[in-house]
Image: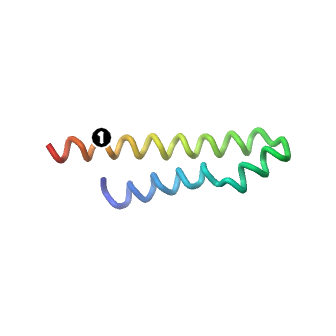
Amino acid sequence: MSGTEKTKAQAEQAKGKAKAKEMAARALGNERMTADGHTGQAKGNARQAKEDLKDTFRHH
């Protein structure tokens, strides 16, 4: 995985996992903010899976 793509994936995952933000959103009943956290995490996970797949084929 290229360093740039790996960094992007990790940043998106971290953005989605911002526990303080997610906990505050839940406490306030802010569904949009909670959904934004889930979306960011899903995007980061998808990017990470794509890069892992590329690495797998690159090493064979």
Q: Residue 20 appears in which quarter of the rendering?
A: bottom right
Q: How many marks?
A: 1
Given residues 20 and 57, the one toward you in this image is 20
The answer to whether 47 appears left or right of 14 in the picture is left
Q: Residues within 10 Å of mark 1 (few under 14, many from 20)?
A: few
The image position of residue 38, as x and y in percent, is 62, 41
The colour mode here is rainbow
Please name the residue that numbered disc 1 is placed on.
53
Q: Secondary structure at mark 1?
A: helix
The answer to whether 19 appears left or right of 26 in the picture is left
Residue at 42% over, 44% down: 47
Amino acid type at mark 1: Leu
Residue at 32% over, 45% down: 52
Vertical placement of residue 35 versus 16, above or below: above
Residue at 19% over, 46% down: 58
Q: Residue 32 appears in which quarter of the rendering?
A: top right
The image position of residue 3, as x and y in percent, is 34, 61
The image position of residue 35, as x and y in percent, is 68, 39
Given residues 14 and 43, the one toward you in this image is 14
The image position of residue 9, as x and y in percent, is 45, 52
- The residue at the far left in this view is 60
Q: Which quarter of the rendered picture does the C terminus lie within?
A: top left
The answer to whether 37 appears left or right of 54 in the picture is right
Vertical placement of residue 20 versus 36, above or below: below
Residue at 31% over, 57% down: 2
